[in-house]
Amino acid sequence: MAAVDASYKVKDWLQGKTAITISDETIKSICVDRHVDPDEPYLHLGQREKDLCLADLYMFCVALPTSTATIDDKNGNWEHKEGSVTMSGSDRKHLRLLAYRLYRKWGIPIQSMSSVKFGVSGIRNRRR
């Protein structure tokens, strides 16, 4: 295992945990919600904070659109591409499972949408 130096920040670690490009604002929001400084060295973070930030990142990814488009920029000899990402239902399910495991590990209650029941109620026409 390669040694991690003190310049490796929490935000860099979170960005590296998924192939999906996550905005700096999203990373900052996840960190702030967990009372973590995104610029703090990764080595200073406790295991609980690491796990919960990672679980929150996974849940953010679950909420993303199924696919995103490719962005191409060109200017003379310079070229930059950001690839598209498609996430299947099984990908989402796997990320949600990983997040739930981390939440459970630290005793964080999980409210699952599977426990929510939807129904249809309508107006009945009563004959008089």
Image (tube, rainbow, N blue to C red):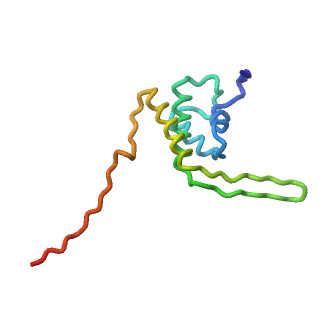
Q: Position of residue 111 (x, y in %)?
A: 38, 41
Q: Residue at x 55, y 23 (%)?
A: 46
- Give left or right: position of 101 versus 20: left
Q: Residue at x 71, y 23 (%)?
A: 4
Q: Nearer the viewer, residue 46 or 70?
A: 70
Q: Position of residue 59 (x, y in %)?
A: 51, 42
Q: Position of residue 63 (x, y in %)?
A: 52, 49
Instruction: Name which quarter of the figure residue 9 lies in.
Output: top right
Q: Residue at x 77, y 58 (%)?
A: 72
Q: Nearer the viewer, residue 98 or 12?
A: 98
**Above-or-below relation of 81 to 94:** below
Question: Which quadrant: the N terminus?
Answer: top right
Which residue is most to the bottom? 128
Which residue is most to the front? 90
Q: Position of residue 83 (x, y in %)?
A: 72, 52
- Give left or right: position of 77 versus 81: right
Q: How many marks?
A: 0
Which residue is most to the left? 128
**Above-or-below relation of 41 to 77:** above
Q: Residue at x 34, y 48 (%)?
A: 116
**Above-or-below relation of 4 to 67:** above
Instruction: Name which quarter of the figure residue 12 lies in.
Output: top right
Q: Nearer the viewer, residue 82 or 10?
A: 82
Question: Which quadrant: the C terminus?
Answer: bottom left
